[in-house]
Amino acid sequence: MNTLFHFRLKAYLFALAMIVLIGFSTLCECATANDQPVIHVGSEVNFPPYAFVDEQGQAAGFSVDLIKAVANTMGLSIDISTGTWDREWNALVSGQLDLLPIVAKNPSRLTLVDFSLPHTETSDAFFVRQGDPPIPDLASSKSKSIVTMRSDASHHELLERDFQGNLVLVDSIPEGLRLVESGKHDAFLGPLLICSLEIKDKNIRGLEAGTPIPDYKRVFSFGVRKGADNLRETLNQGLLIIKTNGEYDRIYEKWLAIDDPIQKNRIYLLAAVPVALGIVGLAFVVMGIRKRVLLRRNAELTEHNERLERAEKLLRKSELRLLEAQRLAKAGSWGFDLQTGAIWGSDEVFHIYGMEPSSSNLLPIDEIEACIPEK
């Protein structure tokens, strides 16, 4: 009886210990989850389609969806705030924010923040009033009044190149474009795609874009708080994962493909590739068949010409033999054309009548008749 009692007591104690251990493990996991730091993300309010504030006052755009996808993939907890680019950039530099989802990487910024792997790129251009001469590059903008966004990549590029003209800084792209529209300044320097969209969306008139400037490109990455190496590596891993599993392509097509002709028509282009390859292949087949037909025809013509040449040689040889036979036999041959009345004769006929053969071999009737005695 005591043995059974002790066995049951041990079983109860073991079960109680397991319950306590599992409960403690669960509490530890919950505590770990609750202790996970929140990543503070900043997003600018007027940089469509990359970043803007929607009708509900929430951060939206390509870069916002991109950081959300990476955070979800890597299990990061993020909190997104919005503001002007200048304010959000300075907050990142000062360490108040952990990252910005879209920052153009350039040498002047490398000492201020860290950068993830690139996720997109675009070109800049000068926007001038219609009728004004275009500005093809930064060197051509010297001594001009140029408007650009404060703390933007274009602002930093102009400073790095020691811009000597009048530099006017604004807080948003539409504000800068309208200053140029009003005639107060020469041009606005900014991203070609975004500025073009803003001109259309805000109904800004009388401006036209130049060609993409060759001086630099905006290579966009996640801008990360300086020294946050673990966060940067996590973001890099997340980017590679969503680019591999197709999530990046879905986000790109949602926000950017509509303005990218290649991406917009990618389905049609992909469908056209096999058709084009088929047409090219068919063309090669037709050309091959035609080449073989031409080669065979050329061979037939060559053989025909050779046969004619052999026949002509035989005929010429026969004519020479006939002339030689007539010469030896002192006999000639002649013919009469009923339509023209002309008479032709062989060389020997001419010799019989004591005349030299003519080139046409036509017999002179009057001279022949003179050689025939009258009856």
Image (tube, helix red, strand yellow):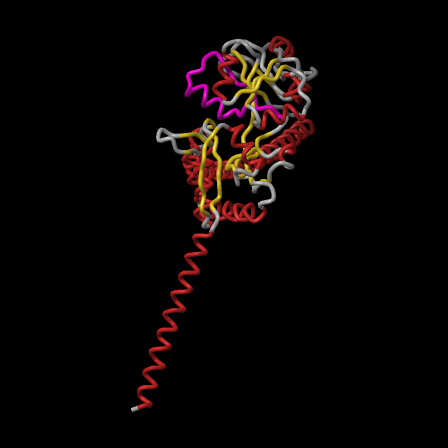
x%, y% of residue 370?
64, 9
Quarter of the picture containing the C terminus is top right
x%, y% of residue 349?
64, 20
Residue placed most toward the observer, 167 or 81: 81
Quarter of the picture containing the N terminus is bottom left
Where on the picture, by quarter, is residue 300? top right
Residue sitting at 46 percent across and 26 percent down? 46
Q: Which residues are magenta?
A: 189-214
Given the current orientation, which residue lies at the most extreme left position?
A: 1
Seen in the picture, residue 48 relative to 335 is either above or below; the reply is: below
Residue 370 visible within the image: yes
Residue sitting at 44 percent across and 41 percent down? 79
Residue sitting at 51 percent across and 29 percent down? 85
Seen in the picture, residue 75 relative to 178 is either above or below; the reply is: below
Q: Is residue 204 magenta?
A: yes
Residue placed most toward the observer, 216 or 33: 33
